[in-house]
Image (cartoon, grey):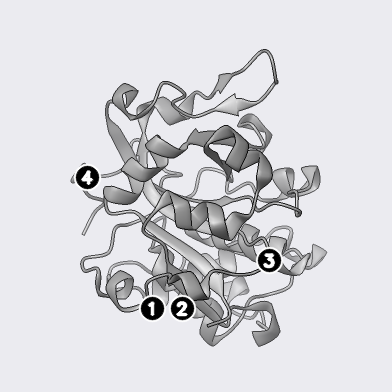
Amino acid sequence: MRYRPINGEPVDPRLGRFQPDDWEHLESYPLMASAIPADPTPVVIGVNWYREFFEPERDDATGEYWLAPGGPQTLTQVQGGHCVCLEPGDTPDPEDWWRFYDQGREGACVGFGWSRCMSLLNSELYAARWLWDRAKEVDQWPETEPGDENGTSVRAAADILCKSGHVDWQDAYADDNDHTVRDSYKPATQNGLKVYRWARSVEDVHAALSNNRADTLGAVPVLNSWGPGFPHRTWMPDAVFQRLIDEDGEIAVPTDA
């Protein structure tokens, strides 16, 4: 079951996204042109994470950071799987959220990527580790359980958001390291998803994001969940992103239908 294609533990424990064993969900619920949201919408991606992505390169002229600016031909070794949120236009991710959504050294990226997405949609903070727990209860791998360090799939967390919603963050959750305590959190359906679909091209993702800067740069804006130790926003060239999509990437877009 362990992350493919490296057939073992990820190099970094934060790389907790698992590839699903089948792709029926992508085939059954594709993002069609008619379902692309009219408003700028965040996108959640589960993709291979390459060695080069650990060290973003700064463009001295603009101060922006880039992942593999030399293109897909510069990528070498897959280090594991990761889930992150892509930033839409008209809804910039606040500096405070950059600090808040720090997954630490856990394999909780799916919970954090989707929680960041829901914050951008609803302008509220959410309990990301609760979502990580619940996704491991419904994913396809019996050995993933709340309280362990295993990751999960992008699909599993999205299904929880559709069925149960999400948990509003409270300051009392600041020390939420005990999964048995998190079990008592109460989700609200209005904090969740109605529908989501799967994109298969960079063009569809740009259409969903409606991010003018992304369109100008020919890149997508990545919001990582590694706190201030990693740039708030990094740009991934479209050609690199399309390669990750083609390498069994899961690209989830919240939609209305």
Image quarter for residue 235?
Answer: top right
Residue wearing tag 1? 138
Mark 2 and mark 1: Cα distance apart in space: 9 Å
Give the class, few, some or many, for how many residues have Cα within 10 Å of label 4's Cα (few <14, many ≥20): few
Residue 84 % position (x, y):
52, 50
Q: CA distance from mark 3 to mark 1?
A: 30 Å
Q: Quadrant of the N terminus?
A: bottom left
Name the residue located 41 percent from the left edge and 45 percent from the top edge: 15
For marks 2 and 4 on the same chain, the one whose residue lies earlier in the sequence: 4
Label 2 belongs to which residue? 159
Q: Residues within 10 Å of mark 2 (few under 14, many from 20)?
A: many
The amino acid marked with disc number 2 is: Asp
Q: Which mark is residue 8?
A: 4
Residue 123 lies in what quarter of the image? bottom right
Q: Are marks 2 and 1 in contact (CB under 8 Å)?
A: yes
Residues at marks 3 and 4, CA–CA distance in whole angstroms: 40 Å
Up the image or down, 73 lies above or below 89; here it is: above
Q: Mark 2 or mark 1: which comes first in sequence? A: 1
Pointer 3 residue: 39
Residue 2 seen in the current view? yes
Spatial separation of the CA atoms under disc 3 and disc 2: 22 Å
